[in-house]
Image (tube, rainbow, N blue to C red):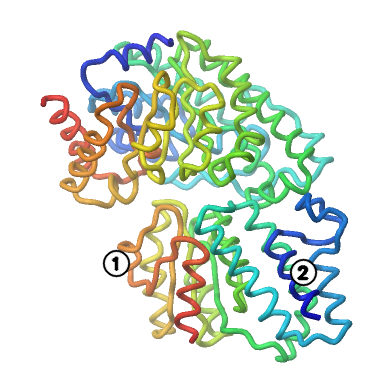
Amino acid sequence: MNTWIKQIMDSPTRVAIPIMTHPGIEESGKKVFDAVTDGEVHFQAIKAVSDTFNTAACTVIMDLTVEAQAFGCSIRMPEHEIPNVIGRLIYDQETTENLEVPSLSTARVPEYLKANRLAVENIKNKPILSGCIGPFSLAGRLYDMSEIMVSIYIEPDVIQTLLEKCTKFLISYCQELKAIGTAGVVIAEPAAGLLSDEDCRQYSSVYVKQIVEAVQDDTFTVILHNCGNTGQCTPAMIETGAAALHFGNAVDMEATLKACPNDILVMGNIDPVGILKQATSDKVYEETTKLLEKTKLYRNFVLSSGCDMPPGVPMANIKAFYQALNDFNSK
Amino acid sequence: MTDILNQLGLCVEFGKINQASPYPPTMKGQPGASELTKEILEKGANPQDILNTALVPAMNRVGNKFTEGKIFVPQMLLSAKAMNESMKFLKPYFLSGEIKRKGVFIIGTVAGDLHDIGKNLVGMMVEGAGWEVVDLGVDVSAEKYIQALDEHPGAVCGMSALLTTTMSNMHPMITTIREKHPNTKIIVGGAPLNAQFAAEIGADAYGRDPQDDINWLNSIAS
């Protein structure tokens, strides 16, 4: 078993790893735009979160446009939110076959590598978890999300070619993150959650598994995040071989823990918007406590947000999240 | 005629767009929604019957299966595409007024937001439920809604948002729209939203999924 995972499972207390960098961006007095374009600012946000909260590992910005931009997608970059992909890069078999797999020196990839490198060099007391997009979610950004959903049935060969190219890039990206010295990578594959379990296996898990086989070992963990999954494709997520699975708030965490092997980490799933951002701190405390109580028999559970914590989450709510954890652990 | 209408309903329900489409594998090589609609019209079927007895019930079955978790986004989109193929043949009858629809639904993704898969799904499903849909696209301002309402007085509006940052644009947009068109009914939806948020911003309803939107729209149309 992976060393880091064994430490968590052997821990006498429950640990929390919310996916959050936006509170760090806000704490640093910077804008989202600054953090997604400048590796130094990004790192300072990671460090601010690490310095402020008792998180068991550091996470990076869940920016699902970095890789698509490297492939050539146009990006719109607002000041206070994560970037968006504009339009469509790939249309058909010809454009798919002509698509070049980019190098890691393309677009904003070097800035993201820089942020990871600085985090590894300067945050010594916690593991750093990198991040990247999943293959199907990346392919959807290149091909258009609505169109790829239809084309997996109409032109499956084209989509498989596209997925192979996406996977090739992601393997190279994850290998570089591993070489930098991070402890693992959170692969965000939310679009695969819109598929049935069978389609999720065929158009996501097969490719995620290739990434897992290329990078996962005792020192490097793949955490597969799929907040689109409503429970139907949990078996497909397990099939990837990822040592940790991260779930969104659409699943019942207790049922999910029952469905997952007990030797992989199962992480989640406080609603990042409806609870963490919009509810009162009392409600955050109540929901977090409820989740901790429901999952207390499972050594492989890690408390987390159901997705990347969005900009503008009140500090009092994050504190309530941690207060609930501390009170639970003090019992 | 009933047999062909039933077959057309099955094509829409199972996403058989046309004869050339390989999906679904069990209907490979068979005529799809496109060919069957053409054939039915040539045989003299009433266009309103095609809509009411084949397309609307089929899309209703699709919406219910999606809500129940029996099908997923790809299958729903394929059904919507099959329905759209059929609708192409019915378009002249809509324009001439021979087919009556339940009302006009203006839909868009809110200002600042470029995500459209949820909006597209809702638009196609609502059209399949017998409404005329005016799709304003993504990053839609209040002014564009107002312009569309000027052209379609009494229309119902739908707004979608995927981002927590752009969902906050809904409230000022609703306020602006209602300053010009005070009685406009508005339904909102999108992954980060919930019914409480919808109520707080003055929306008339929250659509959890496409069928939810359709059920609400039909309730106010009747």
Lateral position of residue A155 relative to residue A148, left or right: right
Lateral position of residue A61 relative to residue A44, left or right: right
The residue pinned by badge 2 equals B7
Q: CA distance from mark 2 to mark 1?
A: 45 Å
Lateral position of residue A80 relative to residue B152, left or right: left
Lateral position of residue B64 relative to residue A98, left or right: left
- Dot in front, 2 or 1: 2
Answer yes or no: do the residues labelled 2 and 1 have beta carbons within 8 Å? no
Say which chain tag 2 marks. Answer: B
- The answer to whether residue A69 is seen in the rendering is no
Say which residue appears at 73% left-offset and 80% top-offset.
B50
Give residue B200's mark.
1
Give residue A322's mark.
none
Of the 4 image quadrants, the one containing the N terminus of chain A is top left
Question: Number of labelled discs?
Answer: 2
Instruction: Please tell me which of labels 2 and 1 falls first in the chain.
Output: 2
Say which chain tag 1 marks. Answer: B
Mark 2 neighbour class, 10 Å CA radius: few under 14, some 14 to 19, many 20 or more:
some
- The answer to whether residue A276 is seen in the rendering is yes
User: Residue B42 in the image: x percent, y percent?
Assistant: 88, 82
Of the 4 image quadrants, the one containing the C terminus of chain A is top left
Frontmost residue, B180 versus B209: B209
Say which residue appears at 34% left-offset and 36% top-offset.
A254
- Element under label 2? helix
Amino acid residing under circle 2 = Gln
User: Residue A173 in the image: x percent, y percent?
Assistant: 59, 21
Amino acid residing under circle 1 = Glu
B215, above or below B180, in the image: above
B110, above or below A247, in the image: below
User: Residue A239 in the image: x percent, y percent?
Assistant: 56, 27
Frontmost residue, B14 versus A126: B14
- Element under label 1? helix
